[in-house]
Image (cartoon, helix red, strand yellow):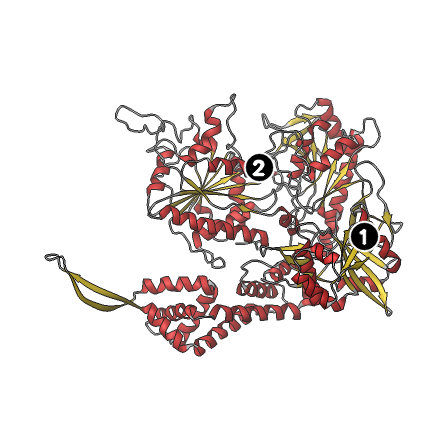
């Protein structure tokens, strides 16, 4: 892969491969079974990157997940839209370094292969399977001799191609169903049977083609797909693969905030707010330009886009007024910088004497000269434009679902990562000229996922919402508080945070990635050679220490033991004599074991070690065979992988410590790579948080009331105030009790860059992150010392796991803090647990419920 997978993407790929391995075994077993499962991920989670990693693994194997390749694999990628297939095909080529252009084919009407070929990905859209398509025409008709009539100019229908592929025992057909909810709902009485069943025909079989063996349905909303598959006769349903939306939000692939603007006075303000939208996209342009100048980044420059959403039948007056307002407010623009994606004729428009070009939605992102886009509905088909940062919607208030659908497609971050500490560059602006406060508050609920809206059929209309997302009303942007002394910020910079452990992460892969990064950035030239020298030296040591075991493993691999039993055909009597025999293994058998060693030790390590052995043999004729045999045998020595992992972990940790300062001096883009590598560990890793640069909070609530403020926050407005609308009632009580004793405080955000994150595991062993609400800074014996105070309801399901995670964190870092406290309300009284105390941590680890802790002796009244 050209991209490093995020932790949730890696988990999803692993789970999908487990299912595919089972599905493959079921299909090729003595009693073949068809299977299906779903992969659900919110919009923006990177489903194509995950799919590319899955496809690479199916074709080439995956040593990290111990997944063997399938030489007979054929992948059919199916959706209901040609442009979406084209977009996906292009992205797979972008993401994968092992899938070549020649191995990706689009099935057109003139497709003439007798069967699908192994090692290829075929793209097909549903229109090609309707009864009028040349690809299947005649495929359902039978002549007098019971023969299927082929389509014109073709040897067989596509249904026959499928049948030939599925019936070939050397092949395995995997169907990846993109946007899997489409075509799965039950047909209404006004729809034709064909329209609602083409996908089902493909899956369940048609015109002599059997049911496809393996189906993976991919969608943000998979309930229809799951229901349809459960109703399929004889199909085994495998466990669903579910991507946690909160993990996607934490990853930085999605914007954190939606800034909501609407008129509070009555009157006609559409052009006034459109001008505001134009100013905001201009300001965003300046901010991005400044960011790139400061970073000296290799990232592609971001050119923010303003989307102007109009009703389905906009008047000529509306369009004329909108275009003229835009050009007046941004004189540097011309009509060539404005485009539209209206459906229908797909032709250019003449508006107010200007020619407004039509652009296909999937091409908007790459056409950076387009700065204003006119749109109607959600632009859901083919739309993927992370640089779209401002939306002005002229749709009326009753069209809130159309607005939220489009916003859901505008929440991807332009750099595919969060900009550390800058809320403005991590947000999308939404301006609603025709909305009142009441209707706007309904949009807020829709965006936060607290209501499904008024549309009874919202399946597939993913708004991109997720835990951690904020909708800000009348947002106020805050900078570094001038009243906070430098010593506080110096202490803030040293606050230890934690990464989220990755399940099954390979220490050797982590070390290899770190070595490549250090060498690339010029921090440690030759780091890759150093890393592999240490790993190969460890293998030499293991080989010397376990020579006896190595010799035995070599003998087991290089010889085949067997027995001969003689039975008389004349008498039917089995001779009691059993003759044992041995045969030398051929090169193919040794190569099979060597490939297994590659999955176990790591393909690159196995290859380098085999070369190391061959070099020592002075080009002996059997050098290649012996080197691979020895490497395969070494992989069988007990504990060899643990030894390698230990060396890799120690070396990586040492480099992270030694080069902490130069890594911290790199650009955000490069530091993000090291952060991912740091997180590739089975245990939480300690990192430092990033200083916030611009912090944004709501200045009003949904009812129009001004949000209360407090002073002494690290970030503030020009008057030194910080809005506390995000805090609950008794969280504010905690804040007000602490402030008289503090020199500063920090409202810890629920994200991982400029936030203190603490890793904890739930009862099932799954890792999560806790973001304590409040950090206070006090002077203790003349020094500034931080304290963590985390108000959290004791009766929530995660209360006890979070307390245990806080206890583990305090065990490692208690000396840095004055206090590490958890607070809850019991019978109307606030109770506090101080986790800097060892006896308290012991009690927490032994507890069966959080409530017993807060009611017990280890807690005191706050």
Residue 206 image position (x, y, % from top left):
38, 32
Sequence-wise, which precedes: disc 1 or disc 2? 2
Residue 318 image position (x, y, % from top left):
73, 25
Front of the two marks 1 and 2: 1
Q: Nearer the viewer, residue 700 or 524?
A: 700
Residue 676, located in which quarter of the rendered image? bottom right
**Tag shown at residue 138:** none
Question: Disc 2 designates what residue?
Answer: 382
Residue 297 seen anywhere in this rendered image of the structure: no
Evaluate if marks 1 and 2 touch, with contact meaning CB atoms under 8 Å apart: no
Residue 260 image position (x, y, % from top left):
76, 38
Residue 22 image position (x, y, % from top left):
43, 50
Q: Quadrant of the C terminus?
A: bottom right
Question: Disc 1 designates what residue?
Answer: 829
Q: What secondary structure is found at the residue carrying circle 2?
A: loop
Q: Residue at left 71%, top 56%? A: 852
Residue 557 to residue 106: above or below: below
User: Hey, which residue is sitting farthest top in the picture?
Assistant: 190
User: Hey, which residue is sitting farthest left in the picture?
Assistant: 570
| Side (left or right) of 816 relative to 150 | right
| Side (left or right) of 212 relative to 487 | left
Q: What secondary structure is found at the residue carrying circle 1?
A: strand
| Side (left or right) of 606 relative to 700 | left
Q: Nearer the viewer, residue 420 or 611?
A: 420
Q: Nearer the viewer, residue 728 or 337?
A: 728
Q: Estimate the spatial distance between the alpha carbons at disc 1 and disc 2, rounded to whole Å.
A: 54 Å
Residue 615 to residue 758: above or below: below
Q: Residue at left 58%, top 71%? A: 650
Residue 322, located in which quarter of the rendered image? top right
């Amino acid at each position: 892969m050209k991209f490093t997978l995020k932790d949730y993407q890696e988990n999803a790929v692993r789970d999908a491969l487990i299912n595919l391995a089972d599905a493959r075994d079921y299909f090729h077993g003595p009693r073949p079974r068809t299977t299906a499962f779903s992969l659900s991920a919110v919009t923006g989670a990177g489903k194509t990157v995950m799919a590319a990693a899955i496809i690479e693994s199916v074709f080439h194997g995956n040593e990290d997940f111990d997944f063997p390749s399938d030489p007979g694999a054929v992948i059919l990628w199916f959706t209901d839209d040609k442009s979406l297939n084209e977009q996906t095909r292009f992205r797979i080529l972008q993401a994968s370094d092992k899938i070549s252009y020649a191995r990706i084919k689009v099935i057109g009407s003139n497709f003439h292969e007798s069967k699908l070929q192994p090692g290829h990905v075929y793209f097909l859209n549903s229109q090609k399977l309707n009864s009028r398509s040349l690809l299947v025409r005649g495929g359902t008709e039978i002549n007098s001799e019971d023969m299927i009539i082929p389509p014109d100019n073709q040897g067989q229908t596509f249904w026959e191609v499928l049948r030939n592929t599925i019936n070939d025992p050397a092949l395995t057909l995997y169907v990846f169903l993109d946007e899997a909810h489409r075509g799965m709902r039950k047909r209404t009485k006004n729809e034709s049977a064909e329209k609602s069943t083409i996908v089902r025909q493909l899956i369940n079989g048609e015109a002599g083609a059997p049911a496809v063996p393996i189906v993976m349905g991919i969608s943000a909303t998979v309930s229809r797909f799951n229901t349809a598959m459960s109703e399929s006769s004889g199909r085994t349903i495998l466990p669903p693969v579910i991507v946690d939306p909160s993990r996607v939000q934490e990853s930085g692939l999605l914007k954190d905030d939606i800034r909501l603007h609407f008129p509070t006075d009555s009157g006609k303000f559409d052009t006034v707010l459109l001008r505001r939208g134009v100013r905001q996209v201009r300001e965003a342009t300046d901010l991005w330009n400044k960011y790139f100048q400061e970073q000296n980044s290799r990232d592609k420059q971001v050119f923010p886009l303003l989307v102007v959403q109009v009703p389905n039948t906009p008047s000529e007056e509306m369009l004329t007024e909108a275009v003229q307002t835009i050009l007046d407010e941004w004189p540097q623009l011309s009509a060539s910088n404005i485009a539209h994606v209206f459906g229908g004729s797909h032709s250019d428009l003449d508006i107010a004497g200007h020619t407004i070009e039509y652009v296909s939605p999937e091409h908007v992102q790459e056409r950076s000269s387009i700065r204003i886009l006119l749109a109607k509905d959600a632009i859901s088909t083919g739309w993927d434009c992370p640089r779209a940062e401002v939306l002005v919607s002229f749709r009326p208030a009753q069209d809130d679902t159309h607005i939220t659908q489009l916003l859901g497609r505008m929440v991807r971050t332009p750099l595919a990562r969060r900009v550390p500490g800058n809320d403005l560059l991590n947000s999308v602006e939404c301006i609603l000229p025709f909305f009142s406060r009441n209707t706007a508050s309904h949009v807020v609920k829709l965006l936060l996922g607290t209501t499904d809206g008024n549309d009874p059929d919202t399946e597939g209309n993913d708004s991109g919402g997720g835990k951690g997302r904020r909708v800000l009303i009348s947002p106020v942007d805050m900078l570094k508080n001038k009243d906070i002394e430098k010593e506080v910020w110096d202490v803030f910079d040293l606050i230890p945070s934690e990464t989220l452990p990755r399940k099954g992460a390979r220490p050797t892969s982590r070390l290899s990635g770190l070595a490549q990064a250090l060498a690339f950035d010029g921090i440690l030239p030759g780091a890759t050679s150093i890393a592999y020298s240490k790993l190969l030296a460890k293998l030499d040591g293991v080989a010397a220490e376990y020579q006896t075991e190595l010799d035995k493993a070599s003998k087991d691999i290089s010889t085949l033991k067997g027995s001969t039993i003689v039975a008389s055909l004349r008498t039917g009597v089995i001779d009691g004599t059993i003759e044992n025999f041995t045969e030398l293994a051929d090169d193919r058998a040794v190569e099979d074991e060597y490939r297994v060693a590659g999955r176990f030790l790591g393909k690159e390590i196995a290859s380098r070690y085999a070369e190391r052995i061959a070099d020592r043999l002075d080009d002996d004729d059997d050098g290649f065979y012996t080197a691979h045999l020895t490497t395969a045998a070494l992989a069988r020595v007990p504990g060899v992988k643990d030894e390698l992992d230990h060396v890799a972990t120690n070396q990586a940790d040492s480099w992270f410590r030694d080069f902490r300062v130069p890594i911290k001096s790199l650009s955000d883009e490069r530091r993000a790579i090291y952060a991912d590598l740091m997180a590739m560990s089975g245990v939480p890793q300690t990192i430092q948080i990033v200083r916030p640069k611009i912090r944004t909070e709501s200045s009003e609530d949904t009812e129009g009331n001004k949000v209360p403020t407090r002073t002494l926050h690290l970030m503030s407005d020009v008057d030194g105030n910080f809005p506390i609308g995000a805090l609950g009632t008794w969280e504010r009580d905690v804040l007000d009790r602490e402030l008289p004793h503090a020199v500063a405080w920090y409202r810890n955000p629920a994200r991982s860059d400029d936030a203190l994150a603490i890793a904890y595991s739930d009862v099932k062993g799954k890792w999560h992150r806790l973001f304590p609400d409040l950090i206070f800074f006090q002077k203790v014996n003349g020094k500034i010392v931080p304290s963590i105070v985390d108000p959290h309801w004791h009766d929530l399901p995660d209360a006890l796991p979070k307390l245990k995670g806080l206890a583990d964190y305090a065990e490692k870092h208690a000396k840095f803090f004055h206090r590490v406290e958890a607070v809850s309300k019991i019978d109307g009284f606030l109770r506090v647990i101080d986790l800097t105390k060892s006896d308290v941590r012991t009690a927490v680890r032994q507890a069966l419920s959080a409530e017993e802790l807060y009611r017990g002796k280890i807690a005191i009244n706050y």
